[in-house]
Image (cartoon, grey):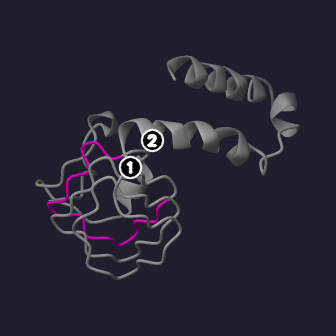
Amino acid sequence: MHGRLQSLTDELDALMATSEALRSVDALALPALVAPVLDEVVALVGGGGPQHRRADLAGRRLTDLRGACLRGASLLGADLRGADLREADLLGADLRGSDLRGADLSTALFVTPRQVASATGDGTTRLPGRLGGAPQWWA
């Protein structure tokens, strides 16, 4: 898997090496290039939880999401207080306005700083270490 990821990284780097190369990139084709590898990563380290790919979960109260597929899901304003999101696939999930206080995202997959910054959390929210900590405005 490490070799496949490195090969994909090299291919993407080559596509962005120059402004000319970048202009020739078919942005609509990129997901098809990357998705199979990301799916394989999820199968190896996560998965097995609830399937909510591209689901509309806006405003819902959710707690047991360990290993869940939330890829592309709308979690706008969702109440995720204390939720277990370990190994959950959050690629493209919309967390704007979600309440993550006390939630555990410590091993969540594909969570980004932008997703976290758009939600509400606190000192008890557990985030992946690679994010470098919680947003400053979280209490």
Residue hosting label 2: 43
User: Does 37 sit above or below residue 71?
Assistant: above
Please rate how many residues cluster around mark 1, counting C-alpha atoms within 10 Å: few if below 14, some from 14 to 19, many from 20.
many
Marks 1 and 2: CB-CB under 8 Å? Answer: yes
Q: What is the distance, in whole Å, between disc 1 and disc 2 at their CAs?
A: 6 Å
Q: Is residue 113 left or right of residue 65?
A: right
The residue located at (40%, 48%) in the rendering is: 111
Looking at the picture, tell me which residue is in the foreground, 77 or 73.
73
What kind of residue is marked 2? Ala
Looking at the picture, tell me which residue is in the foreground, 19 or 130.
130
User: Does 62 sit above or below residue 49?
Assistant: below
Give x and y (percent) for residue 83: 21, 63
Q: Is residue 115 left or right of residue 37?
A: left
What kind of residue is marked 1? Gly
Asked where in the image residue 63 lies, by quadrant, the reply is: bottom left
Give x and y (percent) for residue 28: 78, 51
In what element is the residue under mark 1? loop
Q: Main secondary structure of the magenta part?
A: loop
Residue hosting label 1: 47
Q: Is residue 48 left or right of residue 14?
A: left
The residue located at (72%, 46%) in the rendering is: 32
User: Does 41 sit above or below residue 109?
Assistant: above
Farthest residue in the bottom direction?
Answer: 59
Give x and y (percent) for residue 51: 43, 64
- Residue bounds of the magenta highlight: 93-108
